[in-house]
Image: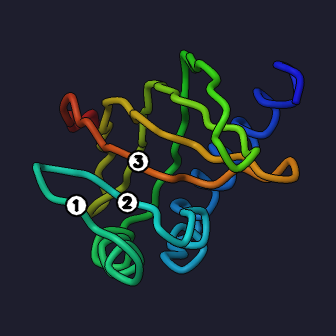
């Protein structure tokens, strides 16, 4: 894969993740993880069906997710897949109880790309803070 193809696959994955979160679709978020994928947050790790359960318990607020500052490096897997280590910032605008709240932080990902399709092999959520703005 060329660098442009890799970046496009990563951006499509990040966009699909944001859309699934904003649609409160925990099953769609979980489908973005590889079969042996891991989610890491607050010194805990979720795998398999636990990933969907994690998101189902958290996707109960109307929200808009944005990513920024994507950085990535490529490495090739022994089985021919492309592995990518990436990091990007996130901003989530949430609307709890008729207020507006901003959550921010970064995602640290290991992404597996096969046949042009990207999935999370591992995703770590690193929150930096939350602010009520209205």
Residue 29 horizontal side relative to residue 81, left or right:
left
Q: Which residue is mark 1?
A: 45
The dot on residue 38 is 2
Secondary structure of the residue carrying numbered label 1: strand
The type of colouring in the image is rainbow
**Relative side of 24 to 49, left or right:** right
User: Along the polypeptide, which appears first: circle 2 or circle 1?
Assistant: 2
Q: Quadrant of the C terminus?
A: top left
**How far from the left and from the top, in percent, is residue 32?**
60, 63
Marks 3 and 2, how far apart at CA: 6 Å
Q: Position of residue 52 (x, y in %)?
A: 41, 78
The residue singled out by tag 3 in the image is 123
Looking at the rendered structure, the number of numbered marks drawn on it comes to 3
Q: CA distance from mark 2 to mark 1?
A: 6 Å
Q: From what the image shows, is residue 28 above or below residue 32? A: below
Residue at the spot 73% in from the left edge and 45% down from the top edge = 81
């Amino acid at each position: 894969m060329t660098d442009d193809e890799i970046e496009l696959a990563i951006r499509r994955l990040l966009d699909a993740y944001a859309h699934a979160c904003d649609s409160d679709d925990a099953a769609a978020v979980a489908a973005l993880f590889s079969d042996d994928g891991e989610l890491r947050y607050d010194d805990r790790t979720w795998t398999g069906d636990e990933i969907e359960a994690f998101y189902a318990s958290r996707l109960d607020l109307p929200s808009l997710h944005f990513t920024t500052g994507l950085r990535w490096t490529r490495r090739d897997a022994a089985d021919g897949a492309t592995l990518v280590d990436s990091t990007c910032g996130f901003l989530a605008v949430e609307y709890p109880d008729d207020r507006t709240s901003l959550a921010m932080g970064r995602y640290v990902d290991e992404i597996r790309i096969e046949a042009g399709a990207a999935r999370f092999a591992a995703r770590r959520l690193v929150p930096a803070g939350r602010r009520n703005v209205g």
